[in-house]
Amino acid sequence: MTILDRILPDVRRELDAAREVMPLDELKGRAADAPAPRDFAGVLTAHGFGLIAEIKRRSPSMGDMRAENVAAAAAAYEAEPLVRAVSVLTNTTHFGMDMDDLRRISATSTKPVLRKDFILDPYQVYAARAAGADAVLLMANVLSAGQMRELHEVVLELGMEALFEVHEAAEIEALPGTARIVGINSRKFKSHRGFVAAGDNVEEDFSLDFAAFELAESLPAGCVRVAESGVTPESVAPLARHFDAALVGTSLLRDPRGVAAALGDFARALAVRPA
């Protein structure tokens, strides 16, 4: 089994449980009453290369984050100008987060917030908007071209944005023509290796293939380009020549010096990046 084979059934179980608690019609009403979406696409292009900084309690690739870093992350991201937007995991089983976390962070952040999850159904998009999210992740390795198109229609109707995530050339070709923000994820989701067992922690992420970032020049013309997974202060400067932003999480949330110190490393690396 790949990591997706393990994760997706749990995603569907969490989705079914959410439907039991709140019917779609009620959720749509809450989405309509939510504060207006913040401009996720705009902040990624307005001030040059920046970060989408992530909050999660654990990951299938490396295990637990530092609890003190997770607790400090929202305030640190709010204070750091290099952070343009915040990514919040909402998958409980594999990342230790839920919709209450998204709701709380969306309510206190002045920066756009991305619901990062395995979005499979319009219900999850409405739930994201009802919780105050401004964007959602749509993954080309779990959605068909038709599903991406249909989900994006719901996203746009709600005034939100979608970060489309791709891993290979065929997935780029499947993107809808309306895609405005596209991320290349270096994580090998289809690999049978590189992911830790529940409760384990590792110091090196073996689930990455940085060659995926070479697809940047194949992305749709004019789209906002995002580098995802495995980005560190040591690797971010070269990526900034080809991308508009990087989504970073583990390198911030596992740094023993704290989130603010880790963000400082990114800021210094980008300040001296080659032209």
Image (cartoon, rainbow, N blue to C red):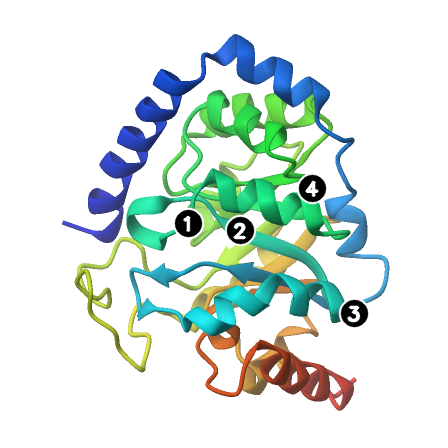
Residue most toward the left? 1
Q: Nearer the viewer, mark 1 or mark 4?
A: 1
Q: CA distance from mark 1 to mark 4?
A: 27 Å
Q: Secondary structure at mark 4?
A: loop
Q: CA distance from mark 3 to mark 1?
A: 25 Å
Nearer the N terminus, badge 1 or badge 2?
A: 2
Q: CA distance from mark 2 to mark 3?
A: 18 Å
Residue at which label 1 appears: 97
Instruction: State which quadrant residue 200 falls in.
Output: bottom left
Contact between labelled residues 3 and 4, with CB atoms less than 8 Å apart: no
Q: CA distance from mark 4 to mark 3?
A: 23 Å
Q: Which mark is residue 81?
A: 3
Q: CA distance from mark 1 to mark 2?
A: 8 Å
Q: Nearer the viewer, mark 4 or mark 2?
A: 2
Residue at which label 4 appears: 180
Q: Amino acid at mark 4?
A: Arg
Q: Which mark is residue 56?
A: none
The residue shown at (68%, 87%) is: 269
The residue shown at (70%, 74%) is: 241
Q: Amino acid at mark 1?
A: Met
The residue shown at (35%, 17%) is: 20
Contact between labelled residues 2 and 1, with CB atoms less than 8 Å apart: yes
Q: Does the rendering let one see residue 120?
A: yes
Nearer the N terminus, badge 4 or badge 2?
A: 2
